[in-house]
Amino acid sequence: MISRGPSLTEQVRQHIKEAIAEEQFEDGRIPAEADLATELGVSRTTIRDALSRLEHEGAIYRRQGAGTFVNQHGLQIRSKLDEIWSYEDVLEAHGYQPSVQVLNVRTEPADEATAEGLGIDIGDPVLVTEKLFREDGVPVVLTENRIPAALVGGDIQESDARMPIWDFLATHCGRSLSHYLSDLVPVSVGGVVAARLEMKASAPAICFDEIGYDSDNEPIVRATSWFRDELLRFRLIRRRAAM
Amino acid sequence: MISRGPSLTEQVRQHIKEAIAEEQFEDGRIPAEADLATELGVSRTTIRDALSRLEHEGAIYRRQGAGTFVNQHGLQIRSKLDEIWSYEDVLEAHGYQPSVQVLNVRTEPADEATAEGLGIDIGDPVLVTEKLFREDGVPVVLTENRIPAALVGGDIQESDARMPIWDFLATHCGRSLSHYLSDLVPVSVGGVVAARLEMKASAPAICFDEIGYDSDNEPIVRATSWFRDELLRFRLIRRRAAM
DNA sequence: CAGTGGTCTAGACCACTTT
DNA sequence: AAGTGGTCTAGACCACTGA
């Protein structure tokens, strides 16, 4: 194993993931951790960290005393809800050619929900960008991002909004998006949303209503997104919580 | 620290979690890992494992070179989507007195979706249990569980179905539920579901359609659940996926 | 019983942030 | 420069599985 760039653990994870994809393991059985450690020339801890990540992703499962195995069911997942980052990436993972259209860039006063989520006052100006993602020309995701205008440096053109939101936040706000806290809200799509997504009005849909935080845990963006369910269905793995 | 029962890591996690709840840390700053290790008499690895779990739960966040801090926003989460296990527990976490009503226990032939999910043939008999959860008397969650009849030992009464599904699977099927792979489906609730949840017909709702697997990664149960969104809203933390 | 994953230790070095 | 979290090592012992 080479050691430049990503961490050893990440390299090991990739290595094993590729081996799984190439079906190099007979019977879906993955070698013992100690064997992998010897073979790859790293410590067992590093192997275990990599395997833990793969287990969390659903690519493998482990049984104490028995061994580590490929998870046939988990491999089918295309878009894991808790790992979604850019819609371009999600759509690409589905095997489509994604395209982005910036519908609108404007500044408006914050409404109550936005102000509360972003920790600003009602009426404070927020920059709103509306984007529509299509795959093979069909609209799939509609998103609205709201960023406190006080965070945005300089004038923003529509062309600036094309980039993924975390790139925008890094470039124009000097903040790095760390994670989202997301609410899942069932809705009947209203007239405007339905029209943009080319759905029947009042059709059921899932709406993400989420706040994005930077590495200092400060809220920096409120994102609201609607999805065409038939085209983009979300999955997740649910495990027992520690009590 | 005592070492009986749960792992050291789990004890440390609980210890720190309680300290956070009691606001023992000034300025939301959590002591350095090395200090915690000395104070609690465990290795830094154990501390780190405990902190990693708390970070994943959203209770804390870490910044390399700076320190570890309480996550004020994450603490507000009541029901994390990826950690839901029993609806009784979820409702209790919301501060309500939950109650369970078994609506129906029957055996029926598997439809296509059930057969595919459970790896059985269409028409094979499945045991179906319907349950309604209320909080303070108000219906909140409706669930249908389908288990291949071949897995179920002995005759099942309605009273047997009252227990949480993983207890049922352990008691009557000798299987231990390991995790769910869950689809989130937006729906308009139909007449029967709406009536049972006392919702307006055709109101939007989120439906879980999920397959539960045992520790051998074999599908053992298909669960379908509907929720009253106003009463039980789901949240999750989304982080950047490893690419 | 041998082999496997689960837990834990003690220590090293690095990358990064803050003073 | 000092302090912090991030990565990695080498090794120990335990709990569990399966032949």
Image (tube, coloured by chain):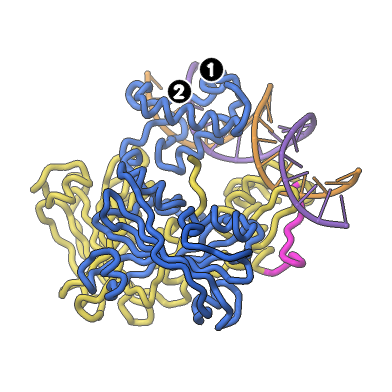
Chain colours: A yellow, B blue, C orange, D purple
The range drawn in magenta is: A22-33
| Chain name for mark 2 | B
Query: Residue at point 25% right, 60% down?
Result: A224
A89 or A155: nearer the eye? A89
Residue name at image x 61 percent, y 31 percent: B5
Q: In what element is the residue under mark 2?
A: loop
How far across and down, in percent of the image, does residue A195 sit?
A: 20, 78
Precedes in sequence: disc 2 or disc 1: 2
Give percent across and percent down for residue A9: 62, 47
Q: Residue A172 at x, y = what percent?
A: 27, 51
Q: Is mark 1 on a helix, strand or loop?
A: helix
Disc assigned to residue A192: none
- Residue A157, placed above or below residue D1: below
Q: Along the horizontal axis of the image, is B49 left or right of C5? A: left
> At label 2, which amino acid type do we have?
Pro
Name the residue beneath numbered marker 2. Answer: B31
Residue type, label 1: Glu
Q: Which residue in the protein does label 1 denote? A: B39
Residue B46 lies in quadrant:
top right
Look at the numbered discs 2 and 1 and tell me whether their residues touch, using CB distance below 8 Å: yes
Disc 1 is attached to a residue of which chain? Answer: B
Considering depth in this image, is B223 or A35 the residue closer to the camera? B223
Q: Does the magenta stretch include residue B71?
A: no
Q: Which of C11 and B39 is in front in this view?
A: B39
Q: How far across and down, in percent of the image, does residue B9 sit?
A: 57, 32
Rounded to the nearest angstrom, the CA distance separating label 2 from label 1 is 10 Å
